[in-house]
Image: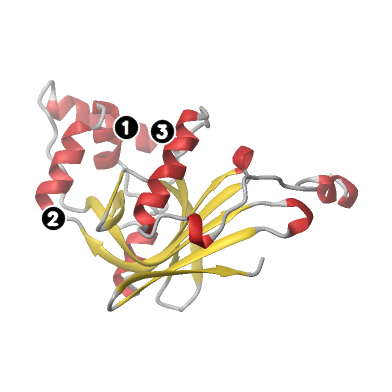
Amino acid sequence: MTKDQLWRFGDDYAGVPLDPADCDPDPIAAFRTWFDAAIAAGLPTPNAMTLATVDERDRPAARIVLLKEVDERGFVFFTNYDSRKGKDLAAHPFAALILFWEPMHRQVRVEGAIEKLADADSDAYFASRPRGSQLGAIASPQSQPIATRALLEQRLAALEATLGESSPPRPANWGGYRVVPDMIELWQGQRSRLHDRVCYRRDVGGWTRERLAP
């Protein structure tokens, strides 16, 4: 791919104007409106989001995870606590999220502290997962080196033989995290790169919002 080909991507954006005065004073409510619109538009995997963390060396890392719940307390995802992201969050319990809905020229940025979900909440979600996903979460030593895929499949087969038809319990090293936001930004692409950005920040009195320059 040439420079010229790359430069043609994202030549311009267009969207409904976004003004702080017209935005819901509650950023979670504003997020839900946009998220529901992304679902209604039939976008594939609208709950896919980039999770950015910082490791013990103070170096950033990012990967895609799935948003599984959002309410006034924050944004929830699930993973292996022993994975790289789990270790990052143990070293630095803060994170950033980005959801990007390209056909709508919209993104949402979230920053905040991390907290683990209660065991009962993680148990409930794990029990709701497809059996294959449950077994995969147990069999995979996430983020650890593994010599071949065959070894991973052997671990899965051994687990299936051990469990039979019984339901697997949630492993102690797997569960949910919540990003408790103190900043949420709505970004709406506009022409000539004059994008609309509305930033919410949490203070002792609640949420405030303001426009940011693109």
Q: Is residue 167 above or below residue 79?
A: above
Q: In this view, does 135 lie above or below 97?
A: above
72 relative to 58 in the view: left or right: left
Q: What amino acid is at disc 3? A: Ala
Q: Rate crowding at label 2 as few (under 14), some (14 to 19) or many (20 or more) other CA atoms within 10 Å.
A: few
70 relative to 127 in the view: left or right: right
Task: Name the residue nearer the viewer: 102 or 19.
Answer: 19
Precedes in sequence: disc 3 or disc 2: 2
Kindly report the distance in space between the C-alpha atoms of the residues bearing marks 3 and 2. Answer: 35 Å
Task: Name the residue nearer the viewer: 74 or 51.
Answer: 74
Q: Which of marks 3 and 2 is in front?
A: 2
State if disc 1 and disc 3 touch (CB < 8 Å).
Answer: yes
Q: In this view, does 50 lie above or below 161?
A: below
Q: Residue at x 35, y 31 (%)?
A: 153
Q: From where the camera sits, is residue 81 visible? A: no
State if disc 1 and disc 2 touch (CB < 8 Å).
Answer: no
